[in-house]
């Protein structure tokens, strides 16, 4: 079955529906990134502080306490499930976009590895494997790049590009 570029041949109503979905999904994703910025977990030191606490730092601007096991499992559980669903839906639409196969499969599959590395890494940081904070930052950046690239490609093809 030929599915590369099938997105371009869908009726306008379906393309508009998918475009609106990608826009709303993107608003949700960006809101999550804004929250990450508010919690100052965009740096390796911020990740460590957010999950291990900073109660030993008398100069800390905001006091943070080490997360408990129940809280860590809840954070990881909800994020892995919700992010997997987000990238499953986005990747499912991207399968039908007109793209070279290698780029398409990278954008579709890589976020799932980044989900495991990001949230698995957060768990390992919490368990004391502090060097994992660098993996968390790198995988989080890569996951966000894949989301943004996929959303931009999809919106372009759904709203602007015409079928040949």
Image (tube, helix red, strand yellow):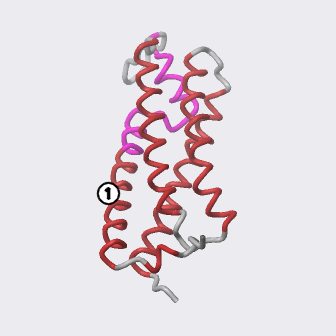
Q: Is residue 29 magenta?
A: no
- Location of mark 1 (residue): 24
Residue located at (53% from left, 70% from top): 97
Q: Is residue 78 left or right of residue 150?
A: left
Q: Quadrant of residue 107?
A: bottom right
Q: Which residues are magenta?
A: 32-55
Residue 54, above or below 35: above
Residue located at (46% from left, 68% from top): 154
Element on which disc 1 rests: helix
Main secondary structure along the magenta-highlighted residues: helix
Q: x%, y% of residue 69?
A: 46, 12
Of the pair 163 and 118, the residue shown nearer to us? 163
Residue located at (38% from left, 43% from top): 32
Q: Is residue 15 left or right of residue 41?
A: left
Q: Quadrant of residue 20?
A: bottom left
Q: Is residue 54 magenta?
A: yes
Of the pair 157 and 52, the residue shown nearer to us? 157
Residue 31, above or below 65: below
Q: Is residue 62 left or right of residue 6?
A: left
């Amino acid at each position: 079955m030929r599915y590369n570029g099938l997105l371009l041949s869908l009726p306008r109503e379906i393309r508009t529906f998918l475009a609106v979905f990608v826009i709303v999904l993107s608003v949700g994703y960006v809101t999550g990134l804004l929250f990450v910025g508010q919690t100052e977990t965009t740096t390796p030191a911020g990740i460590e502080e957010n999950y291990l606490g900073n109660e030993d730092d008398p100069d800390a601007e905001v006091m943070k306490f080490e997360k408990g096991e129940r809280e860590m499992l809840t954070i990881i559980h909800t994020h892995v499930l919700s992010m997997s669903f987000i990238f499953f839906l986005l990747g499912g639409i991207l399968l039908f976009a007109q793209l070279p196969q290698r780029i398409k499969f990278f954008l579709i599959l890589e976020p799932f590895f980044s989900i495991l590395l990001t949230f698995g890494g957060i768990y390992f940081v919490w368990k004391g494997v502090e060097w994992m904070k660098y993996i968390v930052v790198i995988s989080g950046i890569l996951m966000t790049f894949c989301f943004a690239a996929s959303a931009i490609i999809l919106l372009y093809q759904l709203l602007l590009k015409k079928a040949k």
